[in-house]
Image (tube, helix red, strand yellow):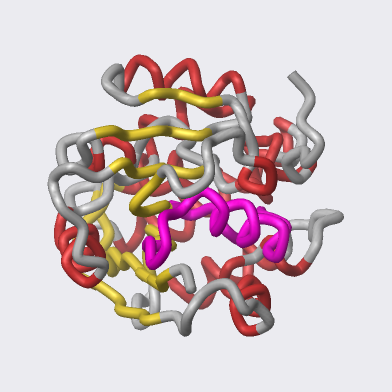
Amino acid sequence: MEHPHRIDPLARAFAGVADVYDQARPDFPPEPIDWAWQRLELGEGETVVDLAAGTGKLSQSLVGRAARLIAVEPQAEMRRVLAERVPAAEIVDATAEDLPLPAASAGAVFVASAFHWFDGPAALASIHRVLVPGGGLTLLWNDFDDEGQPWAEEFGERLEAVPAPDARPENRPYTGLWRTAFEDSTLFGPLESRAFARKARVEVDRLLLLMSTWSVLAARPKAEQEELMRDLRRILEPHAVAGEVEVTRRVDVHLTRAL
């Protein structure tokens, strides 16, 4: 099915790595979701939408909290894994900009590591229509931070050498350009933000597998990907202890309410 608002071409790279994505991407810890749930005053009887649900990393955490979970995902390869991982979710093939859900039918919409792919104003209008008055919107990004690590500088320089994709700058969450849609919107209140961070040790193999699912890397030719992973492994392994390196696991949460 081709939607009026199709996903960004660079985001299509996720389709080719759906199983690896599900294996490598970290789950969401309960603390940031608890915080958002409480701040938005959500109850047990809520209908909740997980928008751009991917393989269900966030859906797995939401399904036990919501009375009804609707997982929206436009890529068939992702939906296949999602259906296996979260069978209790109602799965919908759609995009953020054109949600085929009834008006005022959801108490909250959650978006995990995906809002930067959306057409911000169109997505906010679509989300606002689906939410009940005063309903909540929560954006989360699950990431790692290598700041302060002895391998960080060389590691970053090697990643910067990867040819820049032909993509909108809005598609990079670290630019913060996704915020513009909220700053210009009259549909939602100001964003409330909080970061949840903790030190963790991660296997080098798992860290590289995770990085292979980043769109900018997954979109590169296979030979180029393999060369990059060899170089990154060479940088990391001298600093590994028992095959692991230290990173900071970080979940950034931003929430708001429909006006």
Tell me: residue 206, above or below residue 192.
above
Q: Residue at x 46, y 38 (%)?
A: 53
Horizontal side of 216 relative to 250 (left or right) equals right
On the image, which quarter does residue 48 sit in?
top left
Q: Position of residue 65 (x, y in %)?
A: 17, 43
Residue 194 shown in magenta? no
Q: Residue at x 78, y 41 (%)?
A: 5
In the image, 182 versus 204, the foreground residue is 182
Residue 137 shown in magenta? yes
Tell me: residue 73, above or below residue 200.
above
Q: Position of residue 8 (x, y in %)?
A: 76, 45
Horizontal side of 136 relative to 98 (left or right) equals left
Q: Position of residue 139 (x, y in %)?
A: 43, 62
In the image, 228 versus 187, the foreground residue is 187
**Magenta segment range?**
111-138
Q: Residue at x 30, y 79 (%)?
A: 194
Horizontal side of 239 relative to 54 (left or right) equals left
